[in-house]
Image: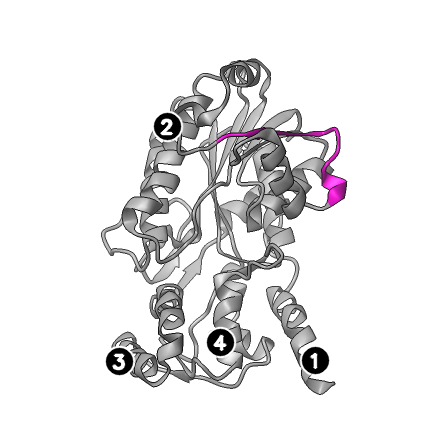
Amino acid sequence: MSGLVLLTGATGAFGRCIARELLERGCELVLLVRGSSEIEATCRVLAALDTRDASRSVTVLHGDISLPGLGLEPRAANVLRSTLDGIVHAAATTAFGSPLADARRVNVGGTCNVLDFAQTVDGLRSVGYVSTTFVAGRRVGTIAESELVHGEGFVTTYEQSKYEAELLVRAAAEAIPLTIFRPSVIVGGETAGKPSALFFVLSMIRRGLLPILPAGRHTRLDLIDARDAAAAFATLLGGADGGGTYHLASGTEAPLVSEVVRAAGAPQVRFVDEDAFAGELRWLRRAEPRAATLYERLAKFIGILAYPKIFDTSAAAAALNGPVRHADPLAGIRAAFAPDEQESAA
């Protein structure tokens, strides 16, 4: 894709990877960032992106997707309506334990506002929406890219709110050239000082605070290297004319949960079913009262392991003329925990 692109969520873990990839491919970016002023929004961008990204190809606007009109000043909004070539909506709250109303306010309401704004843009060529593979919720087995609607329920409010948002996006696809992207668990896009839920869980396992997981020995956890996901995103967005849904995932090559734990240098864990896990987690909260809040946070993310899935990537691979995954995502986990091992050795 080329031209002028409005990107939401550029300060997030995956959004910052998308920003770098689009810049490298010659796009000019307008980054919509929360802040009370352009200065505050720009500071947030500089803290999240490498300084080489802050070039004349980047414009920062302060706004808020949860507000009508994206919280943009009228003059800025009018300029964008006449100049934008594309929109990428990657902003979301990924807090797994958020109250459903809070998750909906950002993930559903924010998406609705982005779609409303997109319909006012003249000559819009492409809109990319960043969803998640976990809109599949409590479904198990192989999940096709074309599938969405189900009644199996959800593990987290994040999953449910993203599912509801994707329903809105699909409904709007008749009027807007929309492409939906569903990344799995991103490895390597973490912002400094903000470890992802995956790395938080693995660090707890390494410390011996989480000796059990609600999974089987052959359960897979789909991970994808951030660079692979961002490169596939940019390529698919550039060649898309709207209407497609793509899994940015490892698919059948996803690693076993035991391999993920081993890559982090963590001790082996016991695998139990969901009910047994809930019981043991209650015991751990009592045994480690100071860590009770941590266990509550962990339970929201770890619960996805109780519903094993394989995310089919056939549509993405066909459009890319090759696989989505190139790098081994476990290498990113090994690299992330290597400093801890070196420190222990010293």
Give the amino acid at mark 2: Ala
Magenta stretch, residue numbers: 51-63
In the picture of the structure, the residue carrying the numbered disc 1 is 343
Q: Nearer the viewer, mark 1 or mark 2?
A: 1
- Measured in 3D between alpha carbons, the distance from the residue under mark 1 to the one under mark 2, in whole angstroms, is 52 Å
Asked whether disc 2 touches disc 4, contact meaning CB atoms under 8 Å apart, the reply is no
Q: Which comes before the other along the chain, label 2 or label 4?
A: 2
Mark 1 vs mark 2: which is more N-terminal?
A: 2
Say which label, 3 or 4, has the lower sequence index.
4
Mark 2 lies on a secondary structure that is helix
Residue 128 placement (x, y as % from top left): 51, 35
Secondary element type, mark 4: helix
The answer to whether residue 53 is above or below residue 211 is above
Location of mark 2 (residue) = 172
Residue 52 colored magenta? Answer: yes
Residue marked by disc 3: 279
Q: Determine the residue positioned at 72% across, 32% down.
A: 26
Q: Amino acid at mark 1?
A: Glu
Picture quadrant of residue 195: bottom right
Front tag of 2 and 3: 3
Q: Is residue 300 left or right of residue 206?
A: left
Q: Quadrant of the N terminus?
A: top right
Q: Position of residue 66 (x, y in %)?
A: 40, 34
Q: Position of residue 61 (x, y in %)?
A: 58, 28
Question: Is 188 situated above or below 92?
Answer: below
Dot 4 amino acid type = Met
Residue at numbered disc 4: 204
Give the amino acid at mark 3.
Answer: Gly
Q: CA distance from mark 1 to mark 3?
A: 35 Å
